Amino acid sequence: MTNWDNARFFLAVARTGTLRGAAAQLLVDQATVGRRIAALEDALAARLFLRTPTMYVLTPAGEALVTPAEAMEQAALQIERRVAGLDDQLCGTIRVATTDSLGKRFVIPAIAKLRARHSGIDIVCVTSAGLANLTRREADLAIRTVRPDAPDLIVRRLGQLEAGIYASRAYLAARGEPREGEAFKDHDLVMYQQPVVPSMWDALCGEPTSRGRVVFQTSSTMMLIEATIAGLGIAELPCFRADDEPELRRVMRGRRDRFDVWLVAHADLYKTARVQALIAAVAQEFVGSE
């Protein structure tokens, strides 16, 4: 056993007797626990548990490791206690990753309220259509519309938002209103670039795009909205943004889509005071948004 990370997986299985119990205790998935135990046994060239139909039972080799593993646990807890004072303080820097659209409507207002209460917290906000890698610490917290499945991440659903089909008043005056079932015949479309949202190239809110002409592409929601306002074409847009634009009109009201928004944090940082404070502020902004 070479480090505390190995020891904590070993102790969790030894104490709970099952992979499921250990996974619940460690806030990871069951498969991750199984892989870590198998890797530890390979590294030590020893079988640590006897697998029975109902539980994992320590072998003699496993029993011999309990005491040194618990000593490592106590040392790790002592380190955590010594730095806990820093994490309990509402100060420090948080890196937040989100999209420009979610950032404008939800994240920036949350940050403003947080900073008014806790001026010692500084924010670095990264906006991108790509997904920040929290495991590599590209961000401490992410607000996104794609649910990740990495076992070391904590995921919380913030809410569900609606998308609709919009065009500018000038575009509709010049080109007329699109009709459901005609697949945007004789109409121009503005779209996300295909790698960003591949499904949008097949349909907008369930209306096929096969008879429309894509005249503008972007990776940014903000640019998509601006292109629609400028009259370049018809777009699928989040209602929370598009409904606030006086130059835009929602069309084909029978066509709509709904999407979830997720808050994602790395398990190692989730319980720090500053991160919890920002999570609470962001979650409050989503109250009543569904």
Image (cartoon, rainbow, N blue to C red):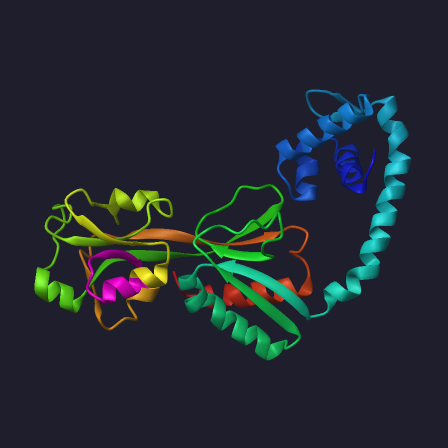
Residue 228 lies in magenta, yes or no? yes
**Whether residue 282 is situated above or below residue 26 in the rendered picture:** below
Residue at x 29%, y 46% (from the top left corner): 200
- Quarter the N terminus occupies: top right
Can you give x and y, in whole percent of width and height, for residue 251 in the image?
18, 59
Residue at x 80%, y 25% (from the top left corner): 48
86 or 231: nearer the viewer: 231
Residue at x 57%, y 57% (from the top left corner): 141
- Quarter the C terminus occupies: bottom left
Extreme residue toward the bottom, this view = 116
Residue 62 lies in magenta, yes or no? no
Can you give x and y, in whole percent of width and height, for residue 226 in the image?
29, 65
- Asked whether, in this view, residue 101 is left or right of residue 35, the answer is left
20 or 71: nearer the viewer: 71
98 or 179: nearer the viewer: 98
- Asked whether, in this view, residue 160 is left or right of residue 12, the answer is left
Location of residue 90 (image quadrant): bottom right
The count of marks equals 0
- Asked whether, in this view, residue 18 is left or right of residue 194, the answer is right
Location of residue 250 (image quadrant): bottom left
**Whether residue 28 is situated above or below residue 237 in the rendered picture:** above
Residue at x 74%, y 26% (from the top left corner): 56
* Residue range (magenta): 225-239
Can you give x and y, in whole percent of width and height, for residue 128 in the image?
46, 57
